[in-house]
Image: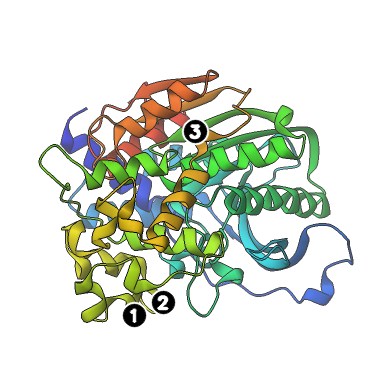
């Protein structure tokens, strides 16, 4: 596929269903009393096929790309969407209220499986429940009933200091598994019949990691037998290996355009593991002296990358580069230990269900070796190389493959 066609697909996938509309909150006292996961319905709304086709065609035309509205309409259907709140477990083990989204083709009366899609890394302002319809829910137009958790720290569970246990194994899996339970309760109340309790887990980038974490959590609950398969693309499953890749390239630390992920991961591990660590022992002097660590609790993640630059040696503490002893820096040692603990390739119970891994050998965000390590650790997995280069375009190809459209295109 050439770059021109890929750019069309990127625009189509990212904007096909990005349109949102105003919605009304449903009073909580109108929700029947219950003892399960579902605790509230934030909103319910619908998107009409014709409206979405027209809006999408107009936007694509404004970008200088000519695609007939009739062609776009063939990919779409009327869709019903609900944002809900549900009960899950917080970092301290106590119950918290989280949020997520459910989407289904309009007129759905029954389903034989749920497709739990775990989203990629987002700014907290862009939680799926805030967007109402996030583009990674696009497989709904292929007939799937979609479930998507916001993750802890997003949506209804956002905390004042903007904490999210980024890539934490147990907390990620628990939040997503509880969202699946809450979605079933919501669908039951809507008189949508469950004919089978099968589940498909799907996700790209952080969503790939979250899909595997959800599988492991379902297995801990004795529910892994309901999982048909996991489709995981571009995911970080081996956190310690990823750190080492960027710390020790052939010619020294590798320049990286997304350096904001380093403190996001450090903070996520510290928060998820409830570690008492100091910024001065974890970040480079330039970060502390310029007060850049202040933005970690006040500004969106997307703004961190430019502010920190591409030289990771000026982002994280020099002791990270002094393994395996790390100059005795207890805080660095604690973070590295948390990365190892939350690396999914070290799971004590390897997956027994089919795991379809996808990764671009030219991925510029998550090293390809990470997928190879996961494939070698999970005997039930297959690894397919994505042909589009880069992490973002790889995500487009991954979604098209899952939807069964890649071969046609």
- Labelled pair 2, 3 in contact (Cβ < 8 Å): no
| Quadrant where the C terminus is found in the figure | top left
Image spot of residue 356 (x, y percent): 49, 25
Numbered label attached to residue 54 = none
> Is 215 left or right of 110, judged from the image as shown?
left
The residues tagged by marks 2 and 1 sit, at their Cα atoms, a distance apart of: 6 Å
Residue at image mark 3: 345
Which coloring applies here? rainbow
Near mark 2 (Cα within 10 A), the count class, few <14, some 14-19 or many ≥20, is: some
> Is 223 left or right of 335, judged from the image as shown?
right
**Can see residue 76?**
no
Q: In this view, does 243 lie above or below 292?
A: above
Image spot of residue 167 (x, y percent): 48, 51
Q: Which residue is drawn at 21% across and 47% down?
A: 65
**Can see residue 195?**
yes
Residue at image mark 2: 297
Pick the front one: 294 or 26? 294
Numbered label attached to residue 294 = 1
Pick the front one: 359 or 82? 359
- Labelled pair 1, 3 in contact (Cβ < 8 Å): no
Which circle's residue, 2 or 3, is located before the other in the chain?
A: 2
Pick the front one: 390 or 347? 347
Q: Which residue is drawn at 29% across and 55% down?
A: 320
Local secondary structure at mark 2: helix
- Labelled pair 2, 1 in contact (Cβ < 8 Å): yes
Q: In this view, does 199 lie above or below 316?
A: above
| Quadrant where the N terminus is found in the figure | top left
């Amino acid at each position: 596929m050439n770059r021109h066609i890929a750019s069309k697909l990127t625009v189509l996938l990212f904007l096909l269903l990005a349109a949102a509309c105003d919605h009304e909150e449903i009073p909580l006292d109108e929700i029947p009393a219950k003892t399960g996961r579902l605790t509230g319905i934030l909103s319910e709304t619908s998107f009409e096929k014709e409206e979405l086709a027209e809006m999408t065609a107009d936007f694509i035309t404004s970008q200088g790309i000519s695609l007939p509205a009739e062609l776009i309409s063939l990919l779409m259907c009327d869709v019903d969407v609900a944002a809900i709140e549900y009960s899950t477990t917080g970092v301290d083990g106590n119950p918290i209220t989280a949020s997520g989204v459910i989407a289904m083709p309009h007129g759905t009366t029954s389903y034989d499986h749920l497709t739990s899609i775990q989203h990629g890394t987002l700014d907290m302002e862009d939680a799926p429940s805030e967007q109402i319809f996030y583009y990674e829910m696009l497989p709904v137009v292929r007939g799937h009933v979609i479930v998507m958790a916001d993750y802890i720290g997003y949506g209804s569970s956002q905390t004042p200091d903007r904490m999210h246990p980024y890539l934490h194994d147990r907390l990620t899996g628990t939040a997503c598994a509880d969202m699946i339970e809450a979605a079933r309760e919501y669908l039951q109340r809507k008189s949508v019949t469950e004919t089978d309790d099968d589940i498909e887990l799907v996700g790209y980038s952080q969503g790939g990691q979250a899909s595997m974490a959800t599988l492991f959590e379902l297995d801990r609950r004795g529910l892994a037998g309901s999982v048909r398969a996991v489709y995981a693309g571009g995911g970080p499953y081996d956190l310690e290996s990823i750190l080492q890749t960027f710390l020790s390239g052939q010619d020294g630390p590798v320049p990286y355009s997304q350096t904001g992920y380093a403190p996001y991961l450090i903070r996520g591990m510290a928060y998820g593991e409830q570690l008492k660590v100091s910024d001065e022992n974890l970040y480079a002097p330039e970060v502390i002296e310029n007060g850049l660590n202040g933005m970690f609790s006040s500004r969106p993640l997307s703004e961190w990358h430019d502010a920190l630059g591409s030289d990771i040696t000026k982002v994280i503490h020099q002791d990270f580069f002094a393994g395996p002893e790390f100059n005795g820096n207890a805080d660095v040692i604690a973070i590295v230990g948390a990365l190892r603990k939350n690396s999914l390739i070290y799971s004590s119970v390897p997956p027994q269900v089919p795991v379809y891994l996808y990764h671009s050998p030219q991925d510029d965000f998550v090293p390809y070796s990470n997928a190879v390590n996961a494939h070698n650790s999970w005997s039930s997995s297959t690894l397919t190389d994505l042909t589009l280069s880069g992490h973002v375009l790889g995500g487009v190809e991954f979604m098209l493959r899952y939807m069964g459209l890649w071969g046609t295109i």
